[in-house]
Image (tube, rainbow, N blue to C red):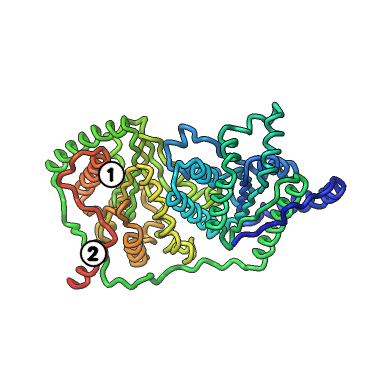
Amino acid sequence: MFEVAELGNRIDKGTYNAALPELRIALLQAQQALREANFPVFVLVSGVNGAGKGDTVNTLNEWMDPRWLQAFSFGPLTDEERERPEYWRFWRALTPKGRIGLYVGSWYSQPIAARVEDEINDAELDAALIRIRTFERALVDDGALVIKFWLHLSPERQKKRLKQLAANPDTAWQVTDQVRRHLKDYDKFRSIAEHTLRATSMGEAPWIIVDGSDHRYRNLTVARHILDRIQKRLARQALIAPEPAALDAAPVVNHARTILDALDLEQQLDKKQYKQQLTEQQTRLRRLARRAHERQISCIVVLEGWDAAGKGGIIRRIVPALDARSYQIIPIAAPTDEERGHHYLWRFWRHIPRAGYTTLYDRSWYGRVLVERVEGFAGREEWMRAYAEINDFERQLTEHGIVLLKFWLHIDADEQLRRFQEREQIPWKQHKITEEDYRNRERAEDYVHAVNDMVERTSTEYAPWHLIEGNDKRFARVKAIRLLADALAQALGDEVSGRDEPIHSDQVAEDKVSAKRKG
């Protein structure tokens, strides 16, 4: 279940000093080789209080090249962190490929401490551990090397160590009231820690238990294990030739008809109706958005859809109803070099709004299961597991209280071609049309299947898809703003009348059956 280094070992000073030169050279060489590798290394240093977590991290910083090494310690939540989902601060602290991140305590500290303090019960602890496993599985599946150390001390040695720390003015700050309580409840702390280690020790990310009573033994054991794991991963990667990404020309399922076929694209508004309803819904949204800001309710709006479907037009009609100081628009293009160095969700976690603020995404994390899938930028295993990763990401957003709206703007092929040709004729719209837009039309069938799978697999009760009929821009804009206002009204506890039902997974299945029968 988890690996255990021998306990009770001690290393004398001469042996220790003799081993350091070769070990430090090997660590530096491994770091240099890692810089050219396509994976990051995350080293977690956890354990009982007084076992030397901070000292171990300081030693590693001394022995290795600090330019390619970064240490993180997670203390009490800041105001900025408290206003976002719990894992926001952990995602932001992930080092890019080719580098090593050292994490003191990490994402394990809070749930263990909370259970010891009886702030959560066993079921809540297990739920937190499931989330940790899901998080680490996403990192490992993306290629990260996750190394986890638990530094252990007997109760007698821990008591002695904490007494030494408290007696030294430079280290007395480490012995907090919480640390003293955990020492008093040592057996309880150990039981909870053992349960945590058993529940979160995975094949690719096992726990290594290290005796922390002797600092020389502890430091050599940790450093040697890190070196061994990095060297083995580098050797394994060198043996595996990269496979070229294959285009996913065939859909996962052969859909005779899709949920998109059931949309009525003939719906429209005339100019008079449009002006009246747009003004009404913008006024309503303005009032609701102001109240949401005062109540510190955040909002994320995701806009996906066909090229020229009108995403930008909807955004331009939403923002006049928002305070310019309380929103940001994130246009998503091909990832930068920095973004490619991280898990694909990293760049989206970075832009989660603070409490009371709104973020609008012009395209989003769904690129992994749309363009990256169809164009072969992501392998089949990558985009297949992305459905579960996205669902977990969105669950964390909504559990935190964020209002999440997902719009798919649908237009038919004839309307898209008309808009392409119109853009070519209007000088200030010509920059919007490229050869790639026409090339994407040639793969429209593959995109249809990808969109259908996306809706089926990621339309959940907590984050449903809203499919918007977009052939008439006026109709689409009013509907999108109304759905956003309805969602804010619901979050604020207002009654919502005339609200379209969102698309849930079970509804998708029923609509598909109905569409097939009609076909």
Q: Is 263 above or below relative to 342?
A: below
Q: Nearer the viewer, residue 400 or 515?
A: 400
Q: Say which element carries label 2.
A: helix
Q: Nearer the viewer, residue 401 or 30?
A: 401
* Quadrant in which residue 436 is drawn: bottom left
Residue occupying image coordinates x 64% and y 63%: 237
| Residue receiving disc 1 | 314
Q: Is 376 above or below relative to 60?
A: below
Residue 110 in view (yes/no):
yes
Q: Is 167 above or below relative to 299?
A: above
Mark 1 vs mark 2: which is more N-terminal?
2
Image location of residue 373, percent across then percent down: 43, 62
Residue occupying image coordinates x 28% and y 57%: 416
Q: Say which element carries label 1.
A: helix
Task: Tell me whether the residue at label 1 lies in contact with that at label 2, contact meaning CB atoms closer than 8 angstroms.
Answer: no
Image location of residue 340, percent across then percent down: 54, 52
Q: CA distance from mark 1 to mark 2?
A: 22 Å
Image location of residue 401, percent across then percent down: 35, 42
| Crowd band around label 1 with a 10 angstrom C-alpha radius: few (<14), some (14–19), many (20+) | many
- Quadrant where the N terminus is found in the figure: bottom right
| Residue receiving disc 2 | 261
Residue 350 in view (yes/no):
no
Image location of residue 147, percent across then percent down: 63, 54
Q: Nearer the viewer, residue 36 or 437?
A: 36
Q: Amino acid at mark 2?
A: Asp
- Quadrant where the C terminus is found in the figure: bottom left
Q: Amino acid at mark 1?
A: Ile
Residue occupying image coordinates x 48% and y 62%: 382
Q: Is residue 162 left or right of residue 288?
A: right
